[in-house]
Image (spheres, grey):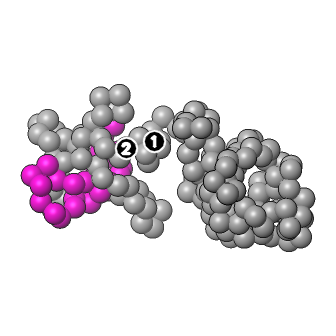
Amino acid sequence: MEDIISVGKILNFHGIQGIAKAGYSNSEIIANLKKVFLSREGKKESFTVQKVNFHKNFALIKFKEINSIDELLPYKGSNIYIDKNEAKNSLDEDEFLIEDLIGLNAFDNNDDLIGIIADVKTSNGNDILCIKPAGGEDKEILIPFAREIVPVVDIAKKKVVIKPIEGLL
């Protein structure tokens, strides 16, 4: 089960019929869930998603196999996993899985190495690339992950190109 990724987490229950209240990172992936894996006592178990609704900033997920609070409680705090290929298929052309971006080399327009993407953070709904500089300095470089600033993302070549903008680099 190495080809699975986490797309959310069961935070609590909603109502008495075993509906999970979940936090998530991508509403489109959550809205299209069909089969998921939940972990309990270190084992991943397969579940069928019957229905997904959104309420405030949470997803309310009804699993076919869970019909009460008592059946759901053992999974409280569990991550929601899906098949990695399923996640990739639901992404648009200019969307990427965070784990695919981490470790990519970041270059400027002149093909000079800036550093390596160490993390991707979200701030006010915008993704930010956290780049560890090639020179070994401790200070991370934070770059907004927008097409105007990062015009090239090549997962196969493990490379992104960052357009130099005054004050950013």
Q: Residue at x 89, y 70 (%)?
A: 16
Residue 84, image x, y percentages: 56, 38
Q: Amino acid at mark 1?
A: Phe
Place residue 138 in its image quadrant.
bottom left
Q: CA distance from mark 2 to mark 1?
A: 7 Å
Q: Nearer the viewer, residue 83 or 164?
A: 83
Which region is colored magenta?
129-153
Vertical order, 83 against 123 (above or below): above
- Categorize mark 1 by other alpha carbons within 10 Å: few (<14), some (14-19), many (20+): some
Q: Residue at x 9, y 52 (%)?
A: 135
Vertical order, 69 against 35 (above or below): below
Q: Nearer the viewer, residue 67 or 158?
A: 67
Task: Looking at the image, tell me whether mark 2 or mark 1 is earlier in sequence order.
Answer: 1
Q: Which residue is mark 2?
A: 101
Q: Are marks 2 and 1 in contact (CB under 8 Å)?
A: yes
Q: Secondary structure at mark 1?
A: loop
Task: Please say whether residue 149 is one of the residues in the magenta stretch.
Answer: yes
Q: Nearer the viewer, residue 127 or 147?
A: 127
Q: Residue at x 57, y 33 (%)?
A: 85
Q: Which residue is mark 1?
A: 96
Which quadrant is home to the C terminus? bottom left
Q: Is residue 143 visible?
A: no
